Each structure stands twice: as C-alpha cells, then as structure tokens.
Amino acid sequence: MDFGYPVLTILIAFPLVAACGLFFLRAPQVVRYYTMAVSLIECLLAVPLSGFKLNADFQFVEKIDWVHQWGLQYYLGVDGISILMVLLTIAVLPLCVMCSWTYIGKRVKEFHFCLLFMTASVLGVFCALDLVLFYVFWEAMLIPMYLLIAVWGGDDRKYASLKFFLYTLAGSTLLLAAIVAFRITGGTFSIPDLMQMNFSFRFQFWAFLAMALAFAIKVPMFPFHTWLPAAHVQAPSAGSVILAAVLLKMGTYGFLRFCLPLTPAASEYFAPMMIAISVVSILYGGAIALGQQDIKKLVAYSSVGHMGFVTLGIFLFNQRGVEGALFQMLNHGIVTGALFMMIGAVYERSHSREISKNMGLGKYLPAFMFFWGLMALASFGFPGTNGFVGEILVFIGAFEQSTILGMLLVPGALLAAAYMFRVSLKMAWGKPSTAKTWRDLNAREWIYLTIPAVFVFWIGLAPTPFFKVIDPSINKLLEDFDSRKVAVVETVQPLQTAAADVLNVTAEKE
Amino acid sequence: MNFNITALVPELFFLCMVLALMVQSLGSREWKPPVERWLPFGACAAFFVTITGFHLHGTMFWDVYKVDLMSQFFKIVITFGFYVVVLNASRQPTLAEGKRADYYMLLGFSTFGLMLLASSVELITIYLALELASYSMYAVIPLRAKDKGAAEAGIKYIMFGAVATALALYGLSYIMATQHTTHIAELMNKSWSFADQPMAVVGLSLFLGGMFFKLALFPFHFWCPDVYQGASNETAAFVATMPKMGAIVVLCRLAVLLKPGLEITTILAVLGALSMTFGNLSALAQTDIKRLLGFSSVAHAGYIMVGLVSGTPEGIGAAAFYGMAYLVMNLLVFWIVSRVASDGRNLKLTDLNGLYKKAPALAFSLAAGAFALVGLPPTMGFMGKFFLITSAWDHGYNWLVITLVLNSAIAIYYYLSLFRHAFTEETTPSEVAPPDNGWFASAGAGMLAAAVLVIGMIPAPLFNFAINAGKTLYGITVTFSGGGH
C-alpha cells in the first residue's frame, strides 16, 4: 500500500528530528510536555501501519542505494514478525515519558533526548532489511542506553552501565564479521535476498555461532545474563522499561530474523544446545528470582526466565512454539514494562526497592495493588491474561517436541508463580506496613498503568487479531526452514570440521 | 621530461605560501609579521585549490612524480589537515611569541613534503620527500615554551627517526641491487616471493620499516606516546595525523607489490594484528589523554594494514578512506584536547569531568570523536572499519579481520572512558584553567564533528573517490563520473 510518503522512514526520523528540537527548550516542564507531544505524534504517525496486509511479504518497503559500489542499501520493511515489535516500541515511548515525569529531576533535556534517540534506533533495528543498516541501528542504540543508566541510574550506576556497554558491544563485534562474511559469500547485504540462498554447512556453522553470541547476550541467555540484573536495578524506571520491553526483544528478533532463515542447517544442528540453555535460563532465572530481596532485581531475574521461554519457543521450530515465542515477546514487553513502571512509582514513595521497605500496600494503595496483582498474574501466565497465551503455546510446542522437555518446563512455571506470589503477598499484606502516609495512584499513573492493563486482557481474552498478523510470516518462516534445513548438510562431523578450521587458521598464522 | 605546470598547481600554491612564511620567519624585534592573521585563509585557499585539482593527472620528472587520483585524494586530505592544524595552533598558549612564524614555516615545509610524498612513485623520490617532511618535524616538536618534556620528546623523535630512516635507506639499497629499478611501476612486475628474491624481500621489509615508523606501527611505535605527551597539544595534533597520511599513501602505492600469500604480506598482516592488540591493551592503562591517543593511533595503524594486505583495489581504497577518517577523527579529538587545556597543560582523563556542563558543544563533539574512533555507527570510523573488513574478507587473512573486530571490543573501554568522564562524572577538579568555550572553539569542534557524522552517514562520494584511486594504482582505467553513488 502506498501512502505517498515513506512511512517507516518518517517513523524513524521524526523522533530524531524532534530530539534536536529539545536543544531549543529550557524549562524542564516544557521539555516534558514537548516530549509527550512528540511521542503522541509518533503514535499517530504509526496509524498508516494499520494498512498492513495479512500476508507474509515485507511491506512498506523502501529501498534506496546507499553506497552503491559496496552494495549497501537503505532498505526498510516490516512483516508479521517485526510489525508487532515496531508497534510495541512506539507504544512504550509515551509510557516512558509519563513514568519519568517526576522520577527524573536532573538533566531533563538530555534524558528525553536519549529516550527519543533510543526509540528511533530501536525502530530502525526492527525495520532494517539490510544487514549493515541493521547493524548501524543495533549499535547506535548502545550510547543512549548507556547514558540512561550511567547518568540517571542508582548508586552503582557506573559499574552497571559499563558492564552493559561492554557485554553488548563485545557480543556484536563478531556479528559484524558475520555480516561481512554473508556479503562476500552471498554477494549481497539484503536480508530478503539472503533468505533465498543456501550456504554450505561449514559457513553456516560459524555464521550461526557469531550471530548467536551477539543475540544471546542481548536476550540475555543463561551464561551471558549477568549484565541484565545490574543494568535493570541501576537504570531509572524508564530505562528499565525500555530495556525490558524493547531491547531484550532485539535479541530474540535477531534469532528469528537471521539465525533461522539465513543459517537453517546450523540452527537445526545447534537447536539441542539452544533448547538446553533456554531451559536452564528458565529454571535458573526463576530460582534466583525466588531469593531476591530487591523487587527490581526480582523482576530482572524473572525476565531471564521469561526470555528463556521465548528462545525455547523459537528453537522448537514448530508452529506453536514460534507463535508462543512471539506472543511471549509481546507479553513480556507489556507486563514487565508495567511492572518496572510500578516499581518506579513505588520507589518515588518509599525511596527504596527493598521488599521489606514496601510492605502492606494493600490497605493504603488499593489501586496500585490492583495493577500490581494483575501484572503479577499475567507475569506467571494466569489464564485470562496475556501471559497465559504465550506460555501455553510454548508448552504445547515443547510437548509436541518431547514429553520430557515439556515436563522440564513445569517447574519453571511453578517457580514463576512462587516468586511472584511471594513478593506480591508481602507487598499487599506484609507487616509492618510502611505505606501509611503514601498517596495512591494519581491520574498520570492511572493512565500509564491502564494502557498495559487493557492489553493484558485483550491479548489474554481475544488473541485472534494478533494471530492473524503473525501467522502468515511464521508459516513462511517455518516452511522455508523445513525445506532448507537438511538440504546442505555436506559433512557428518561438523565438530571435526570446525576444529580443523580453527587449526588451519592457527597454522596459517604461524 | 614532460613537465606540465597545471598539474602542479596545488603544490605550487602551497610552495608559495610556505615561501611567504619563510620570509616572515625572518622577522626581527622591530618587525613582527602577523602570521596568524592571514595563514588560516591561505591554508583554506590551499585546501580549495587542491580540491579543484582533484581530476589532474600526469607523470613528470622522468616518471618519478605522478599526479593521479590517489595523490590528489591524499593532497586534499593533507591540505585539509593543514588547514585544521593551523586553525588549531593559532590559539596555542605554549608557543613563544617570537617563534610563531618559524613554527608555521616548519609545519608548512613538513606538509609540503607530505604533498610531494603523495605523488612520488619512485623509491628515492619517496625517500627525499619523506626527509623533507621529517626534518621540519624534528624542529617543531621541542617548541613548547618552558617544558623539558618537549625537549626530551624531540630528541626521542630524532633518534628513532634517524634509525628508521637509516633502515629504510639500507633496505632501499637492497631493492635497487636485486631488482635493478626503483620505480614502483616496474617493481610491480617483479617477483616478491622470498624463495625467488630473498634480498629484495628483506630490503622491502626494511624500507617499509621506515614507513611504519612514521605510521607508528608496532614495533616501531615506541616514540609515539612519548612524543605526543611531550609535545604541546597543538603540535601533537599535527604529529598524530599528518605524517601518517604520508606513510599511508606510500604504503598504498607499495601495496600493489603485496599479493596475498607472499611472506612479506603475511609479515604485514601479523604486524597489523600485533599492533592493534598491543596498542589497544596499552591504551587501557593510560590516564594521560595524549598518551591514550598515542596508543590508540598504534592500534589504528594496525587497522590500516587490514586493507593493505588484501591485495585488491578495494582494499587500498578502503585503507585510503580509513586514513582520511583517522585524520578527521583525530583532529577532532585533538581540537577538543587543545581547547579544554586552554593553558596548554597536559590533560588527564579527570580533567574532562563535567565537560558537558562547562562546554556542551565540546563535550558533544568529543562524544562524536570518541565513538568514531571506536568504530560505532553512524560515524566515519565505523564506515572506514567496515570497508576495511569487507575488502579483506576472503583474501586469506580472515583471522586478521576477526582480530580487528575483537579489538574494537577492547578499544571501547578506553574511548568510553573519555566519554564517561565528559558526561557522567560530576566531581570537577578545582583550580585549573576552564575550557575555552568561545564561538571559535565550539564552531571548530562542531564542524569537525559534523564531518565525522555526515561522512559516516553518506560515505559514498568520498569512498568512490578512494576506490577509484585504488583502481588507478592497479592500472585499471577509471571513467570519472564525479561523486554521487
């Protein structure tokens, strides 16, 4: 559909241009209203995306030569997998502005600049169909996120921000090498073109590992997750919201967009490993979350578990699993985003994130506890909420794969219920109550909590529209995957080949 | 001898300017010529004259001097660098009043030598041009008023320089003795495998050693951090950027000899890998900003090797492009260092604390410069690095490419600390001269930062220029269709 103007470019460019406008403003309050207006306009600019046709093609495609001689293109487009992420990103922006309305007291202008810059680059990541363009946006997002943590974060912000930056950058350096290798081997940077090609297994083996490292750090999967709790705990609440709702999704999005279509044989080969790591993430995240005293840390570890469900769903390679993964991505964005906003709200009252300093809120902040209870239920997948839809799909997918795998997930789900109940019970009825003098939610807080709550029920009770959007793309993804995953396995002993590769390189070096 | 004076207009213009400086350097106590009044305009004019000469070509002086796309590309870069260096140095606080004209004259002669170097296609000519560029440097480095460290740096530079030049000359004699020619165009057709011509390969390695000294490639880098630290900030800006352009252009021209798989190419690749790793690891421990930048430039010299060993026109083009990116990024960072140290002191990392508050424009530009040096998009540094690794992939040195990308991960730490101190540290050291926050400082930093960002987003015109320049070195005729895509 042609709207007569480049929809995606405008979506990406508008926050950037508007962010530059911030430099001409002075009063903090004006800055807040201005950014709020910008984020609402951004939502309006996303309205043309409702013209998305329910098929598996890339839509709203824009293609301009960038560096012709090198084959770089400015190539944007969305399909069923990315459009939900684009909408989620846009929807999160106004919520972030609202939840930092009073939370952020210093350097307000720069804070909102970072928010807008961040949104633009994340949108770019989800829309880019050129590998290099993808990488440009992927890296550009690091700087504002670093600043969000390092300037407006908690006491230990230096450590947390540095760790975040180093982990993510170190992970993505090899991604760049993989991108270059794809270009030299496949002859193009264009993702849709590369999706049609068959690469040798040896190539896929290394390309998969290089990409999976970058994405696994971003998700984060079990051994690479340590930056996440640090970053979440120290980040201001808007930073946590963006981090949880959008940034982590970039990793799983990467798996769906790159690993499965570009390196199907290697994905198949590594699937048992990825599944094992996902299960470990689920159990480990849940178990660690159970022991936390800090609410924010608890939710951060719960993220590790939830993202484990997503990667698990992806690497099951069946319809239910991948659908579940996408739903879980969306749900986690909504629910965990809301939980972090609420932690921000309660932190403004108690100035502490300890559970023991935030007990017995039920009597004094009933509205707050209503939303908290709702989100906690959604978080561990209570039927009727959105979390249930995602989790049940992954469960079905896992049981389709093997009963044992399915059984392994059950303790994961139980743990989720256990840690969420533990913190919620204490917050609602724990004694002694610290909340006697606190005010309940004000109008602004009502607004920014109602929006995710609506989605919790919508996706939980009537998920059909969402299925309609994602199903064509998922079907195409899996069909392509099934037809190509075994076609090119040329060697029966991939590990030996890999070892030989490494030895050759070291031999050459000497 | 075919002599075409129009092809030499940029050089001649520059020579006239340097001669004018020479006359003014005769100034006495009565006559103090106002050099800084006119020189920035002159340098700017030289830059534009060189740009208008971008399409010139011709070979002259018995084929030792060749004006082609590669030479014009680097002449544009060099005159641009000179322009920025002159502007930067015009506010130099640590330069004795009576020495200003001499200072600029020496810078000018050195730059002139580099311009000649860009066009030299014969080893003896290269050597002579290199010496012209070096001798002035030896005199410039100690020119920092009341500073013993500068004298030490000057002596170090002379000693290392003398040894490196001697090595290069020695190597040159071997090449001449075994290959019977010193013209690069003829050397291109000779064998450079160690089995066929062991002496020639040794000779070329030694000759390249002279270039590596200029480029500060490991293990010829020892002068680099010390000289940066000892010389005044403004002089360091010159030393850090300009002589390296000379070395890069010569290496680009010699790279046509380096087919992938040859022993000498592998040596270069290994040196490149060592250089980037060593440079980055050493830079991690630095607290003096100029030393940090010194080690970072050792690493960057290693990155440039990645393009040179690929043995393709694209690789050479990528190396040339990265050379330009390196110049702009470093000039940007040194501009900020010079402005923040408004009294000419050496800066520690902690001196940057709270810069975002004291001089927002400088701080923002510093961010652009630091992230460009890391190679984060959307900056010139990213594009340069990206072109380098794309051109080098699958030409036998994939491990070098992997080393490069892994090095970016090491490098981020110390570049990030520049950024971190400027933006997130609040405790400011007391009783130091405040940064220069005037329009001159901000405008210069802003424009350089804009260049870094804009070329990072739209690299096509300049990059095509560099690629075409690389192609001319291989004798591929380029149909010139201007800039654009």
Image: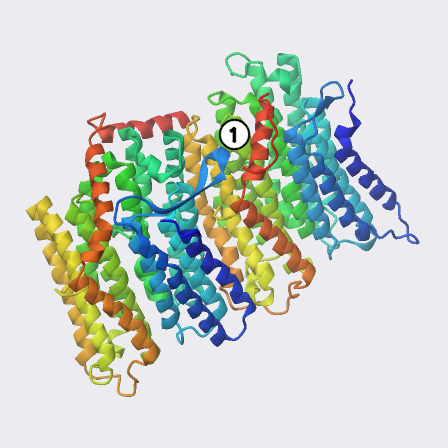
Residue at the far right: name it: B30
Work out whether residue A308 can be spotted.
no
Give the amino acid type for the residue marked by disc 1 in the picture: Glu
Side of B316 relative to B40 (left or right): left
Query: How busy is the neighbourhood of tag 1: few (under 14 within 10 Å), some, or many (20 plus)?
Result: many
Side of A365 relative to A506 (left or right): left
Above/below status of B471 relative to A313:
above
Which sits in the foreground, A68 or B127?
A68
Side of B434 relative to A130 (left or right): right
* Image quadrant in which you'd find residue A93: bottom left
Q: Which residue does the numbered mark 1 point to in the structure image?
A: B314
Residue at the far bottom: name it: A437
Above/below status of B306 relative to A135:
above
For the point 15% across and 52% down, which residue is it? A394
Residue at the far left: name it: A403
Please state the total of marks drawn on the protein image. Answer: 1
Which sits in the foreground, A187 or A340?
A187
User: What is the chain letter for disc 1?
Assistant: B
Quarter of the image that includes the N terminus of chain B: top right
